[in-house]
Amino acid sequence: MRYDYLVVGAGLYGAVFAHEMKKAGKRCLVIDRRNHLGGNIYTEENHGIQVHKYGAHIFHTSNKQVWEYVNEFAEFNHFVNSPIAKYKGELYNLPFNMNTFSKMWNISTPAEAKAKIAAQIEEAGITEPANLEEQAISLAGKDVYEKLVKGYTEKQWGRDCKDLPAFIIKRLPLRFTYDNNYFNDTYQGIPIGGYTAIIEKLLDGIEVRLNTDFKEFSQTPSILMEREDYDPDSFDKILYTGMIDEFFDYELGALDYRSLRFETMVLEGEDNYQGNAVVNYTEREVPYTRIIEHKHFEYGKQPDTIITKEYPSAWNKGDEPYYPINDDKNNALYAKYCKKASEFPNVLFGGRLGQYKYFDMDKTIEAALELVKAELA
């Protein structure tokens, strides 16, 4: 079969690209090593609840064009992300706002909260933060750092905050209003019926092959070349949304990531486990960083509930990579891979893994649409 593009990865980036190329009259084949569409935004119905299989995904954006685009494929509810932080039995609102400060210090006005934070910053006397701990204290004071930043961050990165570089926390958003909305974006919500339906609509009419690993797929022609009846698929270009270092067989070394492990439980006969979609556990002694209760994303009234505990973990080859570690060492290595990739003009690299950069969903759509525009120019 003759194709214009082989799209490696049936996640959001690859699906948007393939959809737009089909509209432009191009023929695409989409492959994915997993047994389902959607990549990490895949949702699966269980007990009438849309379960976010790879962690909580809340769509938010201030880009009206992107919001209108994604609404072509789903109807969104009015979910507002308002996570709770739990520290040694104490509950705090996130992001850090007046509800947080009122609970922490028994104060009620922005002036009191600002004065408390300023006093702690002055007492710490940190002028040039040498690590993440000093950076966080210099921004928000000791109490906020110790209760809401330290343990969570150390679990997320697998290292003590004193051993993490200061640049990881460039700023800590402190809001002096009683507003628990985590995102400042204009538009926010959860697609009714889950994210998988969006990907299915994007890929409608496009050939998709699941359970198909790119390395095995791309080696097939050399295996079958001698067969007289072999008619290989051909592609003008490849869009690769997997790990850029894996594409080159880690020739220059492996980029670093943090991974995640999920523990999902169906709680039959329990209709409400924690009263909120997301509760973060900020003390180091609790091994998971948060518990997601999926039904609350869609205001579910099912008689049962489903929760997922999220455990950060070290990444090794073969594990699922979630968060690029964009420190100086890895950024320099990524730049070398980009230089190597420039030698292959018919291979495009996109998405979180192909571009070694964390993307929110709206930025993923933006980036895919920009690539489409460049390809069709």
Image (cartoon, helix red, strand yellow):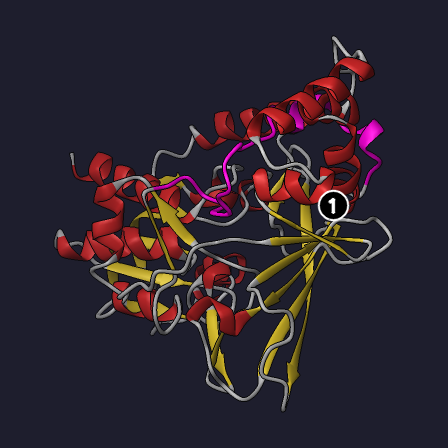
Which quadrant of the structure image shows residue 276? bottom right
User: In the image, is residue 67 above or below residue 219?
Assistant: above
Location of mark 1 (residue): 152
Q: Name the residue nearer the viewer: 169 or 84.
A: 84
Which class describes the residues within 10 Å of circle 1: few (<14), some (14-19), or many (20+)?
many
**Residue range highlighted in magenta:** 159-185
Pinpoint residue 68: horizontal percent, then vertical percent: 21, 51
Can residue 135 be seen here? The reply is yes
Quarter of the figure that contains the N terminus: bottom left
What residue lies at 60% left-to-right and 38% top-to-bottom?
96
Look at the magenta stretch and give its main secondary structure: loop
User: In the image, is residue 287 above or below residue 206?
Assistant: above
Q: Residue furthest right?
A: 285
What residue lies at 53% left-to-right and 37% top-to-bottom?
356
Which quadrant of the structure image shows residue 86? bottom right
Residue flagged by tag 1: what amino acid is it?
Tyr
Which quadrant of the structure image shows residue 351? top left
Q: In the visual, does 131 lie left or right of 265?
A: right
Q: How many marks?
A: 1
Secondary element type, mark 1: helix
Pinpoint residue 296: horizontal percent, then vertical percent: 50, 70
Q: Name the residue nearer the viewer: 50 or 328.
A: 50
